[in-house]
Image: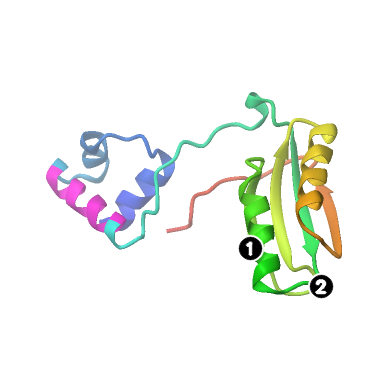
Amino acid sequence: MDRKILRALQADAGLSMADLADRVALSKTAVWRRVRDLEGKGVIRRRITVLDPEALGFGLTVYAFVSTSHHSDAWFSRFENAVRSIPEILEFHRTSGQVDYLLRVVARDMRHYDEIYKRLIREVDFADISSTFVMETFKDGPELPI
């Protein structure tokens, strides 16, 4: 039953408890308890509305691959603070292999991305940042296969 609830909420986080109860064939009270329990366990981290970046003027998606020769706590703290201060950076991952970090960035256009890039390199010293620009997206979604 929890999986049905999670599937429904992934598809539409704005469902009311009554609508969610109808979709999974449980009472509203039972669904509310299960959702509250899933939130308490951390299975549901938050409920969001997914917006269309292009419709809001963010026509460019960029994956920035960051390499560094610095691995101190102080350096990482500066990097993390810089990333968190830039709202166009949507994802921030530490990775294995030749690249240390991966950033997913949205920008209005190339000039806007260049401003974001310059802001980041003013804040933190990097060995290398290389960027890949998304030309076309075929699959994009936050839904987990449950």
Q: Which image quadrant: the N terminus?
A: bottom left
Q: Nearer the viewer, residue 106 or 133?
A: 106
Q: Nearer the viewer, residue 5 or 39?
A: 39
Kindly identify which residue carries mark 1. 77
Is residue 76 positioned above or below 14 on the image? Answer: below
Where residue 22 sits in the image (x, y, percent)? 22, 38
Q: Which image quadrant: the C terminus?
A: bottom left
The reply to whether the magenta stretch includes residue 131 is no
Q: Is residue 82 left or right of residue 23?
A: right
Label 1 CA crowd tier, 10 Å (few <14, some 14–19, many 20+): few
Quarter of the rendering containing residue 106: top right
Majority secondary structure of magenta residues: helix
The region drawn magenta spans: 29-39
Q: Nearer the viewer, residue 122 or 29?
A: 122
Kindly identify which residue carries mark 2. 69
- Indicate the secondary structure of the residue bearing disc 2: loop
Where residue 38 sits in the image (x, y, percent)? 29, 57
Quarter of the rendering containing residue 98: bottom right
Q: Nearer the viewer, residue 100 or 22?
A: 100
The reply to whether the magenta stretch includes residue 32 is yes
Where residue 101 sits in the image (x, y, percent)? 72, 63
Quarter of the rendering containing residue 65: bottom right
- Indicate the secondary structure of the residue bearing disc 1: helix
Number of marks in picture: 2
> Could you tell me which residue is drawn at 39 percent across and 43 percent down?
47
Is residue 38 positioned above or below 15 on the image? Answer: below
Label 2 CA crowd tier, 10 Å (few <14, some 14–19, many 20+): few
Q: Nearer the viewer, mark 1 or mark 2?
A: 1
Under mark 2, the amino acid is Ser
> Could you tell me which residue is drawn at 27 percent across and 59 percent down?
40
- The answer to which of marks 1 and 2 sits earlier in the sequence is 2
Under mark 1, the amino acid is Ser
